[in-house]
């Protein structure tokens, strides 16, 4: 592959996502894909949630034009994830039904697509997963799907983070010579950037669960095909660092709900964006801050990717910084504090 092929795939994805966004908006209204205001939502008026259609259009158009390998299983799984998310947007599926649908789509992808077959050991050498490759790959993909869905709470947040993360993963895949993964990353970046003008504050169209879950799946597919599969020197800490903001938000959500004694999947209003809104930041300021943090952590991750022990050390240091910052803004309570002290439910 040459630079022209990557540039062409990026432009096709960008143009297709941008061109299909107005149609996706009209279809969302027609199909009842609407985010109604409620106490936990940011929007004050009903908003269409068909952004996943535009992301998928950009992904599909560029994949067909660019000759993406393993096109069948990747497109099928992406389509199933999109449809599941749209059904959730329309009918508010229960957590169990939603997870069962995610599990089925990811199982199809892992059985007939790429898997994480080994991972680097931060203390030297590698872990060969053997029969564990299927459950571990599924766990990774399911985690990223839900991480990106969890953080999708304000205009442009998930879309912008996905663009930056995909660009970083493309750079990493190119450095590793993983051209198939690089192509998928470039396509994902193009689709996200093409949709971003419609999703940035003030948004005309929301991603919805379909779009957020789709972006999470595509990022998982990139890292599975690229960094985590293809190089003994690359550790799982690399994509975790790239996605530092959503990863931190998810970990804090789990800890916060355990502290409150409620199920970890129970929604609340103490996510990253909620707390910063409460502190007086605007949606644009929060999105910009998230982009800055993601850009910095992604740059550090790519620069230290070949230094397995260094990357783990950097991830640990940044993790402690993010954890402290999370306590300062109220995303979690200090360990050992009383469960009832956090009044943001």
Image (cartoon, grey):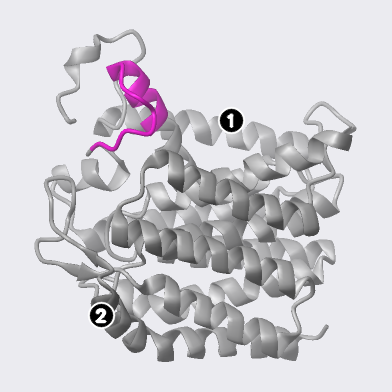
- Residue 332's place in the image compared with 102, above or below, is above
Q: What stretch is highlighted in magenta?
A: 253-268
Q: In which quarter of the image is the N terminus?
A: bottom right
Front position in the image: 308 or 148: 148
Residue pictured at 48% horizontal, 57% vertical = 213
- Is residue 114 something that shows in the picture? no
Whole-percent x, y for residue 270 in the image: 25, 36
The disc placed on residue 316 is 1
- Is residue 208 something that shows in the picture? yes
Q: Does the magenta stretch include residue 247?
A: no
Q: CB atoms at circles 2 and 1 under 8 Å apart? A: no
- Residue 328's place in the image compared with 337, above or below, is below
Q: Which secondary structure lies at badge 2?
A: helix
Q: Does the magenta stretch include residue 258?
A: yes
Crowding at mark 2 (Cα within 10 Å: few <14, some 14-19, many 20+): few
Q: In this view, does 135 lie to the left or right of 142?
A: right
Residue pictured at 84% horizontal, 66% vertical = 177
Residue 10, quarter of the rendered image: bottom right
In this figure, which residue is indicated by the disc labeled 2?
30
């Amino acid at each position: 592959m040459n630079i022209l092929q990557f540039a062409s795939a990026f432009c096709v994805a960008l143009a297709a996502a941008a061109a299909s966004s107005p149609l996706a908006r009209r279809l969302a209204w027609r199909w009842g894909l609407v985010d109604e205001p409620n106490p936990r939502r940011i929007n004050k008026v009903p908003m269409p949630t068909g952004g996943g259609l535009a992301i998928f259009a950009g992904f599909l158009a560029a994949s067909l034009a660019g000759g993406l390998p393993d096109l069948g299983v990747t497109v099928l799984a992406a389509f199933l994830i999109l449809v599941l998310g749209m059904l959730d947007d329309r009918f508010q599926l229960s957590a169990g039904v939603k997870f069962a649908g995610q599990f089925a789509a990811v199982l199809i992808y892992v059985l007939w697509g790429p898997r994480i077959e080994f991972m680097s050991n931060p203390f030297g050498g590698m872990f060969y997963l053997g029969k564990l490759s299927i459950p571990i790959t599924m766990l990774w993909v399911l985690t990223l799907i839900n991480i990106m869905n969890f953080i999708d709470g304000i205009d442009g947040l998930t879309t912008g983070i996905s663009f930056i993360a995909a660009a970083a993963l493309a750079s990493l895949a190119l450095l590793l010579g993983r051209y198939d993964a690089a192509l998928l990353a470039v396509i994902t970046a193009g689709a996200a950037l093409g949709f971003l003008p419609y999703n940035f504050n003030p948004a005309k169209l929301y991603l919805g669960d379909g779009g957020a879950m789709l972006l999470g799946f595509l990022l998982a597919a990139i890292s599975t095909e690229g960094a985590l599969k293809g190089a003994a020197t690359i550790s799982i800490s690399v994509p975790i660092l790239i996605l530092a903001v959503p990863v931190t938000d998810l970990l804090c959500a789990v800890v916060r709900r355990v502290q409150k004694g409620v199920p970890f999947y129970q929604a609340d209003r103490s996510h990253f964006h909620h707390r910063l809104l409460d502190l007086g930041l605007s949606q644009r300021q929060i999105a910009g801050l998230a982009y800055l943090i993601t850009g910095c952590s992604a740059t550090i991750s790519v620069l230290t990717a070949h230094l397995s022990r260094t990357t783990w050390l950097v991830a640990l240091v940044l993790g402690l910084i993010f954890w402290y910052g999370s306590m300062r803004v109220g995303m979690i309570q200090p360990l050992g504090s009383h469960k009832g002290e956090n009044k943001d439910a």
